[in-house]
Image: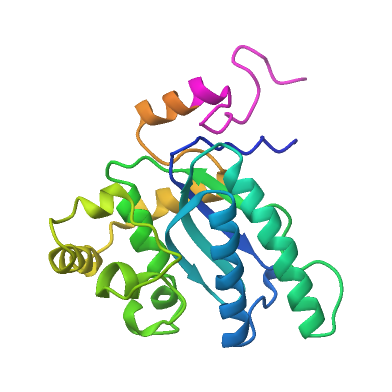
């Protein structure tokens, strides 16, 4: 089955996942993480992409971002991918591909879903058993969004800013979001990221479908209604 075209809309947040080929290691040390962060900031600025949340794991990355135009995210990821592969291959004296084909992405509805994706991304190291708290992991945006660390890479989304009127209260409110996670919502986030279809309610999905001309629900499997099974 042919892959559906990826969907981008200016100003609409996207959850992006890029994995190492066959889940191979993409970051072997802190210098690798730092190099990736440096180029991500460079290309995000170049292509007018606002980065809201992220986590860099040893064999994949999660990003939550929005762009000023519909081509910005694709251009950023293409440039970023090529730059980092050159760096990684040279550093470790290897050749060939590093990433698992195309990155995965899905549009995210702001109401209810956006802050859940923030939390899902920054909880990755905890769910992986690497740390006890997201605050213990260095290569995510948690310290920025929850603890007030400054970062030239991070651009707060308006939904995050709406949590409170000042930074201290906003960070406290954000930390409170991590007290529990709706497992059904987490399953929806994972399913949307895997399928590339919009994450949101039915109205949002229909709006995306109308704007892009791309369906936002999986096709039903099986024979068309009324078609009998061959004898």
Q: Is residue 49 above or below residue 100?
A: above
Give the residue drawn at x 38%, y 62%: 120
Point out the residue furthest to the front here: 46
Q: Is residue 13 above or below residue 51?
A: above
Picture colour scheme:
rainbow
**x%, y% of residue 100?**
71, 61
Query: Which quarter of the figure has residue 44?
Result: bottom right
Decide whether the magenta segment is chiefly helix, strand or loop.
loop
Name the residue nearer the viewer: 229 or 187.
187
**x%, y% of residue 7?**
58, 36
Q: Is residue 103 visible?
A: no
Q: Is residue 132 visible?
A: yes
Give the residue drawn at x 35%, y 26%: 203
Q: Is residue 230 magenta?
A: yes
**x%, y% of residue 50?**
45, 53
Name the residue nearer the viewer: 33 or 123.
33
The C terminus appears in which quarter of the rendering?
Answer: top right
Left or right, 134 with reference to 69: left
Point out the residue furthest to the top here: 226
Left or right, 61 with reference to 81: left
Q: Which residues are magenta?
A: 209-231
Give the residue drawn at x 14%, y 56%: 164
**x%, y% of residue 108?**
42, 43
Q: Is residue 198 above or below residue 86?
A: above
Total of numbered circles in the picture? 0
Q: Is residue 168 above or below residue 73?
A: below
Name the residue nearer the viewer: 116 or 68.
68
Give the residue drawn at x 38%, y 55%: 117
Q: Is residue 214 magenta?
A: yes
The N terminus appears in which quarter of the rendering?
Answer: top right
Name the residue nearer the viewer: 112 or 151.
151
Left or right, 159 with reference to 38: left
């Amino acid at each position: 089955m042919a892959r559906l075209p990826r969907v981008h809309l200016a100003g609409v947040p996207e959850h992006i996942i890029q994995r190492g080929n066959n889940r191979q290691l993409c970051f072997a040390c802190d210098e690798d993480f730092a190099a990736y962060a440096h180029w991500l900031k460079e290309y995000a600025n170049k292509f007018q992409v606002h980065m809201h949340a992220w986590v860099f794991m040893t064999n994949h990355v999660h990003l939550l971002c929005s762009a000023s135009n519909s081509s910005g995210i694709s251009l950023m990821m293409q440039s970023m991918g090529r730059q980092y592969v050159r760096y990684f291959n040279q550093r470790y004296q290897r050749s060939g591909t590093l990433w698992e084909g195309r990155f995965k992405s899905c549009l995210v509805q702001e109401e209810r879903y956006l802050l859940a994706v923030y939390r899902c991304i920054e909880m990755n190291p905890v769910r992986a058993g690497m740390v006890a708290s997201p605050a213990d992991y260095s290569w995510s945006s948690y310290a920025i969004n929850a603890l007030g660390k400054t970062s030239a890479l991070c651009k707060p989304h308006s939904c995050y800013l709406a949590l409170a009127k000042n930074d201290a209260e906003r960070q406290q409110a954000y930390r409170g979001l991590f007290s529990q996670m709706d497992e059904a919502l987490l399953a929806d986030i994972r399913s949307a990221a895997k399928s590339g279809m919009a994450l949101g309610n039915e109205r949002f999905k229909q709006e995306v479908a109308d704007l892009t001309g791309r369906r936002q629900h999986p096709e039903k499997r099986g024979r068309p209604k009324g078609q009998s099974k061959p004898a």
